[in-house]
């Protein structure tokens, strides 16, 4: 990894004015800001009768441990001379929501460009896109058909490396629900996920997953429901590297419940029995249960609280293709101080058991346990309906039972870290 001493220093704002695209975006932001503050604060610009919304966002972030290194690790071990950096992200895009009779077509796209002050090798252009058809057939059948794609740098928290890894995630999905009677509803769904790593060192973690699920629920007159659900998941790793084919099949059967306890509280829960079988690595097979419950409480129009408890399989999107069981709790309070100012928080504690994945048994990673504590506070100010300023602060700490081995190939580094991340942003929609 090259440092800023090996690059020509960028002009002001890390090259903002040196990039023609950013010049145009800055001009757009400035012009939109002037119009927004001149226009009445209670009205946003209507494009295509409010079906189309354009936006641009500028965000500045300070991260004091970009590569999530342990305090016991010299940054030069991974080829850098510093832990922290400041970076800027510019993100223009649009949201589209078009009702047609009883159908609804939705789309969103955000292009983002990130530029670092110090770690310029991490400069990156990515995107986040989604399109969906929310279909309705008669009064009894409804569902969604859609596609989503993201391109972003993979988290450094799970790689212990300074190598940037562009991670592309594609997902196509279809689901349908049908009211067999006023009290009985059936649901079916199928989705395909593909995740590819841009860095050659991590391409053995590329994965393709096919998901199918089916469910049957009973709905009471009070709109409480209870049901049964079955799910099947088939995954394969197209680039298994030195560890051979590590394809797997996973099946689960469980119960679901959804209950509006009072006018101010709501409870949803699911519990499943899960079985995972690997094609050629039976030592990674898993049998166990997963469960997730969420309680939403909104005692007033200004305050709400979501409490989540889970024992679940960590999503591929967050952790790569390793098989990780996460047990933890999360609290998400939100408070509207005034009509224009909101504050919110996310407090999370989780235990993550690494149970399998491509090459994990051979690499000696199976049996790893991490404990992660995270707290995030965010404040948002909306001087006008279409203008939002935000600032946030996050503190995260991880401990792990990983035993360091600097002599290994590649070296095994301590997996614990502490990081503080601060950001400010401005978003204009029109």
Image (spheres, rainbow, N blue to C red):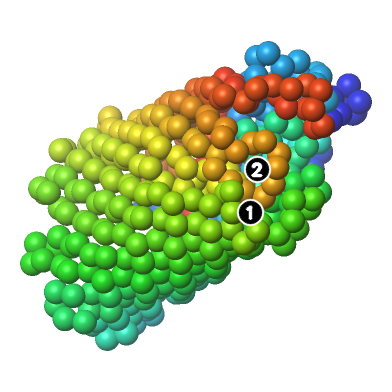
Q: Is residue 202 left or right of residue 137?
A: right
Q: Which residue is mark 1?
A: 281
Q: Nearer the viewer, residue 86 or 349?
A: 349
Q: Determine the residue positioned at 79% across, 50% down.
A: 242
Q: Determine the residue positioned at 65% across, 43% down.
A: 361
SS under mark 2: helix
SS under mark 1: loop
Q: Is residue 147 left or right of residue 201?
A: left
Q: Is residue 92 left or right of residue 8?
A: left
Q: Are marks 1 and 2 in contact (CB under 8 Å)?
A: yes
Q: Which mark is residue 326?
A: none
Residue 41: x and y in percent read: 37, 44
Q: Which mark is residue 361?
A: 2
Residue 101: x and y in percent read: 34, 82
N-term mark: 1 or 2: 1
Q: Check the image and report above or below for 54 versus 163.
A: below
């Amino acid at each position: 990894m090259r440092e800023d001493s090996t690059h020509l220093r960028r002009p002001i704002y890390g090259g903002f004015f040196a990039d023609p695209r950013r010049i145009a975006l800055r001009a757009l932001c400035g012009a939109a800001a002037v119009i927004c503050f001149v226009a009445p604060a209670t009205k946003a610009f209507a494009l295509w009768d409010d079906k189309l919304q354009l936006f641009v966002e500028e965000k500045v972030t300070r991260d004091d441990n970009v590569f999530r290194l342990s305090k016991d690790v010299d940054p030069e071990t991974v080829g850098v001379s510093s832990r922290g950096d400041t970076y800027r992200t510019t993100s223009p895009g649009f949201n589209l929501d078009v009702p047609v009779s009883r159908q609804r077509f939705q789309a969103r796209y955000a292009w983002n460009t990130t530029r670092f002050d110090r770690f310029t090798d991490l400069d990156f252009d990515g995107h986040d896109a989604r399109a969906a058809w929310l279909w309705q057939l008669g009064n009894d059948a409804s569902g969604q058909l859609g596609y989503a794609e993201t391109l972003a740098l993979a988290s450094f928290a799970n790689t212990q490396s300074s190598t940037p890894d562009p991670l592309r995630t594609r997902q196509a999905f279809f689901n349908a629900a049908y009211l067999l009677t006023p009290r009985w509803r059936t649901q079916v769904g199928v989705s395909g996920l593909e995740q590819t790593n841009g860095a050659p060192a991590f391409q053995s973690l590329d994965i393709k997953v096919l998901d199918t699920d089916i469910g049957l629920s009973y709905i009471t007159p009070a709109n409480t429901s209870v049901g049964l659900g079955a799910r099947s998941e088939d995954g394969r790793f197209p680039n298994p590297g030195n560890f051979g084919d590590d394809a797997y099949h996973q099946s689960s059967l469980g119960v679901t419940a959804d209950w509006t306890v009072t006018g101010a509280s709501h409870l949803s829960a699911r519990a499943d029995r899960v079985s995972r079988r690997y094609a050629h690595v039976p030592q990674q097979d898993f049998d166990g249960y997963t469960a997730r419950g969420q309680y939403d409480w909104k005692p007033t129009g200004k305050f709400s609280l979501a409490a989540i408890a889970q024992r679940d399989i960590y999503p591929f999107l967050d952790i790569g293709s390793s098989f990780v069981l996460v047990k933890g709790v999360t609290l998400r309070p939100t408070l509207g101080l005034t009509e224009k100012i909101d504050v919110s928080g996310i407090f999370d504690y989780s235990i993550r058991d690494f149970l399998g994945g491509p090459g994990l048994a051979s690499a000696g990673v199976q049996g790893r346990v991490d404990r992660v504590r995270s707290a995030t506070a965010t404040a948002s100010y909306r001087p006008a309906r279409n203008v939002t300023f935000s600032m946030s602060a996050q503190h995260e700490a991880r401990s792990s039972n990983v035993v360091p081995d600097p002599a290994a190939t590649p070296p095994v580094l301590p997996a614990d870290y502490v990081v503080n991340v601060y950001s400010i942003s401005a978003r204009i929609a029109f």
